[in-house]
Image (cartoon, rainbow, N blue to C red):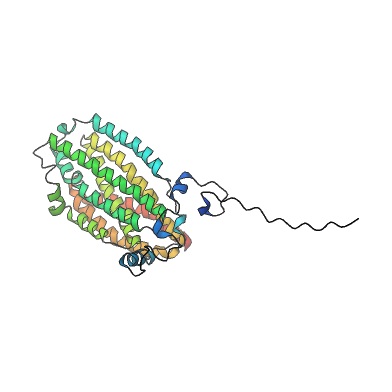
Amino acid sequence: MTEQAEQPKRAPRQRKLRTFSAFGDVRRMPSEYEIVTHSQNWNTRASKASVFEQNPSSPGNLWFLTYREHSPLQADDWEGFRDPDQIAYRSYVNLQATEQTKLDGVLERYHDADSALTATQVERLGALLTPARYLVHGFQQAEAYVGFIGPSSYVTSAAGYANADFLRRVSVIAYRTRSLQLAHPDSGIGTEERRRWEQDAAWQPARKALEQALIAYDWGEAFTSLNLVLAPTLDHLLIEQLGEVSRAEGDEQSWLLAQLLNEDTQRRNRWSSTLGRYAVEQRAANEKPLRKWFDRWGARADEAVAALAPYLGRPEDEVVASARAAREELHAGILDVASAAS
C-alpha cells in the first residue's frame, strides 16, 4: 500500500471586492448614507501629494496646507465621523420636500394675517426679522467655506446641506419681507433692511462678528465660530426667542415659521456637536483650541445678542443669558468628553 502524497493546502479564498470595498474588510453592508458619502472628497485622498495637481507650493496648495493640514484641530481619521441624522441627497430632498409643504401651508393659511398685526409687532419684525436675511446669507457663505475646506467628505456633505438650509431660510425671510411690505407700505419694510444692516447700531456687533468669521480661514476655527458659536447663539434669539415673543403678540404665523425653521437649526446643531465630540475623542489635545475658540467667539456672540435684545422687548440680561445657555448646552457635550478622557 503506497502512501498518498500530501495535498498542498489551499490558499484561503479571497472575498470578492465590492463597490463598498473602500471601507476595508467590513462584515456589514454600509448604509446608503455611507456608500454615497464615504471618501468622496477629491481633495482629501491620501494618495495625493498635494490637494491640487500642480506645484505643491502653488497658492491653492499652500492654502489647504496652512489652513487645514496645519490647523490646530486634527484627527487621526476624519472619515470616521458620521452625521447622526445620516443625511444624504435623497433623504435630504425627501425631508425638505415634506418640510417645505408644511411651511407653504403656514404661509397660505395666514396669507392675509399681516394686515392685522399690531404696530409693535410690525416694528419688531422690521427690526429683527427682515434685516436678518443679510446675516443668514453671511452664514451661508461661511458654511460653504467649511464644506469646501473640510477634512472629510462627511464634513463636506453635512456642511453642504446646512448651506442649503440657510438658503431656504433667506428665501422665507424674503417672502415674509414682501408680504409685510404689502400689508404695511409705510413701515419701511422692504426698503430699509440694507440701511439697518449697515448702519443700525443694534446690528453692528452681529455684522462685525460675521465679517470676522468670514476671514477665519483655519478650518477648525471657521467651523467652530459659525457652527458651534455664532449660529447657535444668534439663532436662539432670531428664531426661538423672536418666535415666542411673536406668539405672545398674537402673530401665530411668525411663531409657526420659527418652529419649522428651528428644525434645520437643531439638525445642524446635532451634527456640529457630534463632530466636536468626535474631534476630542480622536485627540484629547483638541480640547485646547476648542476652548480658546469658544471663549473668543462666545464673547462676540453675546455682544451681538445684547445689542439686538431691546427689539424683543425683554430684559437684555434675560435674552443674553437664554441664548448663552443654549450655546453652552451644545458645548457641554463636547467638553464632557474631554473631562472624561482626562
Q: Is residue 109 left or right of residue 37?
A: left
Residue that protrudes farthest toward the left in the picture: 186
Task: Specify whether residue 151 is in view.
Answer: no
Residue situated in front as seen by the camera: 95 or 259: 95
Q: Is residue 109 above or below residue 286?
A: above
Tell which of 111 and 117 is nearer to you: 111
Q: Give the quadrant of residue 70.
A: bottom left
User: In this view, which residue lies farthest toward the right?
Assistant: 1
Q: In the depicted view, which residue is nearer to us: 67 or 188?
A: 67
Image spot of residue 245 (x, y percent):
23, 41
Task: Name the quadrant of the N terminus.
Answer: bottom right
**Residue sitting at x 27%, y 38%:** 257
User: Image point 34% across, 54% down: which residue?
Assistant: 147
Q: Is residue 188 visible?
A: yes
> Which residue is painted at 36% across and 52% down in the image?
330
Q: Relative to 48, is 197 above or below?
A: above
Hey, which quadrant is residue 299 in on the image? Answer: bottom left
User: Where residue 105 sits: x, y (%)?
Assistant: 28, 31
Image label count: 0
Q: Residue at x 24, y 60 (%)?
A: 212
* Above-or-below relation of 7 to 253: below
Q: Position of residue 230 (x, y in %)?
A: 28, 54
**Residue positioned most to the bottom:** 57
Q: Position of residue 168 (x, y in %)?
A: 28, 43
Camera-nearest residue between 295 and 276: 276
